[in-house]
Amino acid sequence: MKNVLNQLIQLQELDFALSEGKAAATKMPLTQLEEAIAKILKKLPEETADRYQRLRKRYPLAVVPITAGACAPCGMMVPVALVQAVKAGEELQTCPHCGRFLYLPETVAKQAKRTVPRLDEEDRPAPVGIARFSSANLMVPKLSATTREEAIAELAQTLAQQGYIENAEVVTDLALKREAIIGTAVEHGMAFPHVRDVEGGGLTLALGLKEKGLDFGAPDGKLTKIIFLIVIPTPASAFYLRLLAGLVKTFGESDARKAILDCDTPAQMWKTLIKLTRQTIP
């Protein structure tokens, strides 16, 4: 049943990618996404596929995490017995209030790995935790950017310079189109701009800090100081949800935000990021 849950999460991410691609008039081959969606739907039990499609018509998210003991989108507390059933993974479980499929971020896709190596990557021991998705040379403690657009471009350039992506301009353009559809800024001064289907890299993130903050259009009206730019290949879509959940959980804590913002060098940022995410991104 855990395999079915992973398929549902990947299906949801593919649905997102398809919707964004259509809205942004991207050159991404949408027929491939449509075929991938149809393929997963056929693999799912008929009742599960039907329920997923009904939920997607009603809600933006059909498959949601349990955070702090509650269903993340509707906010209703999940009974302890149900949390344990979700953790066991023997059967799919749904929120008693909103009916969405539930999962625990820490139990989904535990062995997520970068699916495409960095362009100049040599054989080395498999990384663990956040090191599967980033490195010290992708930490930018003092962004020079003065706008959202410049910040995304600066982080994309960092990814390109370190060999994780091939074209910074393409990544920047895709990320900004995504921002135009729906902003990625959240509360507490954080933003998670991202793009999918980037050639030449795996699921990878660059992290930039702006002490004075930038206007990312956050829902709480505050300036954004912590910016994660994430590139996501289609095969890693399900892993992206788990990475995002871990980052949100980590930096939802004020002490964690202060710790990362106090960093002055890439090495210090990287050491702090590893320490802070040790439990949330195993």
Image (cartoon, helix red, strand yellow):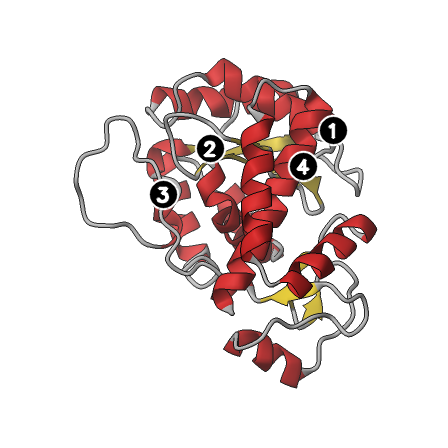
* Residue 181, numbered label: 1
Q: Mark 1 or mark 2, which has the lower sequence index? A: 2
Q: Is residue 276 above or below residue 200?
A: below
Q: Residue furthest toward the left?
A: 123
Callouts 4 and 1 close, C-beta under 8 Å:
no
Q: Is residue 169 above or below residue 80?
A: above
Task: Quote the CA–CA distance across marks 4 and 2.
Answer: 20 Å
Residue type at tag 4: Thr
Q: Can you tell which of label 4 and label 2 is closer to the viewer? A: 4
Q: Mark 1 and mark 2: span between their CA atoms?
A: 28 Å
Residue 275, image x, y percentages = 40, 56
- In this figure, which residue is indicated by the disc labeled 3? 114
Among the two numbered marks 3 and 1 on one chain, the one whose residue lies closer to the N terminus: 3
| Element type where label 4 sits in the image | loop
> Closest to the observer: 186 or 75?
75
Label 2 is placed on what type of residue? Answer: Pro
Quadrant for the C terminus, please. Answer: bottom left
Q: Which residue appears at 67% of the width and 41% of the height?
A: 189
- Of badges 1 and 2, the one in the foreground is 1
Q: Position of residue 133 (x, y in %)?
A: 39, 43
Q: CA distance from mark 4 to mark 1?
A: 10 Å
Asked if residue 227 can be seen in this view, the reply is no
Q: Circle 4 sits on which residue?
A: 184
Looking at the picture, how far across and down is residue 181, in whole percent? Answer: 74, 28
Horizontal side of residue 72 vs 34, given as left or right: right
Asked which secondary structure carries label 2, the reply is: loop
Q: Does 185 appear above or below 120? A: below
Gap in angstroms between the C-alphas marked 3 and 2: 24 Å
Q: Earlier in the sequence, mark 3 or mark 2?
A: 3
Number of the front mark, 4 or 3: 3
Query: Gap between marks 3 and 1, in whole Å?
Result: 27 Å
